Image (cartoon, rainbow, N blue to C red):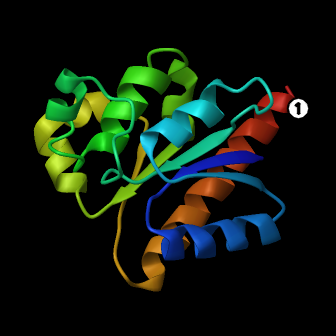
Amino acid sequence: MNILTLENRGSVSFYMTDYLQKEGHEVFDAYNTGDAQSIWESDNYRIDCMIVDLNVIPVGFSTEQKKRSQDGLLAGWVWLSDYVLTKDATMRKRTIIYSRYINDLREDVGDEKLEGIRLVPKSDSASTAEQIIRHIQAIDNMLERKRNG
């Protein structure tokens, strides 16, 4: 499975990428929204799944998007909603948002706009990684069922 990660903290990204690659996944790391957009739009990749942190660097955003991102706090969501979900609504079921700001996101956009997206509160414990792994496995199984008819 091809997985795009949007995470600007190198140490978190490194461990997540390392684990996912050991599990046989192709991982494309983006450290800001500009990097993520380049990978998403590239004809060289077919992204099956996204793991998105909310608090990332908003590169290429308009003034209005920067304002909506609350100075970067929700930049991952603004990028996802404006550039990904508007073009491919099926990504909703194949996206994991993990962040310390899940509650801020819920307050800002409401649960209805988050329907189908897997939300994982980020913490320093192993439970965050375990939740992400379970979601990745579920998405992989869902895609496998679709491929097999």
Could you say which quadrant of the image residue 83 lies in?
Answer: top left
x, y percentage for residue 143?
74, 37
Question: Is residue 41 found left or right of 100 in the rendered image?
Answer: right
Farthest residue toward the bottom? 125
Say what secondary structure mark 1 lies in: loop
Residue at 30% x, 54% y: name it.
55
x, y percentage for residue 70?
14, 42
Disc 1 marks which amino acid? Asn
Question: Is residue 130 found left or right of 17 in the rendered image?
Answer: left
Farthest residue toward the right? 148
- Looking at the image, which is closer to me, 8 or 121? 8
Residue at 13% x, 38% y: name it.
108
Residue at 48% x, 83% y: name it.
126
x, y percentage for residue 15?
61, 76
- Would residue 78 be seen by someone viewing this image from the given angle? yes
Farthest residue toward the top? 87
Question: Is residue 66 found left or right of 17 in the rendered image?
Answer: left
Residue at 21% x, 33% y: name it.
66
Crowd rating for badge 1 (residues with CA inside 10 Å; few <14, some 14–19, many 20+): few
- Would residue 115 be seen by someone viewing this image from the given angle? no
Q: Which residue is mark 1?
A: 148
Residue 47 vertical position relative to residue 123 in the rendered view, above or below: above
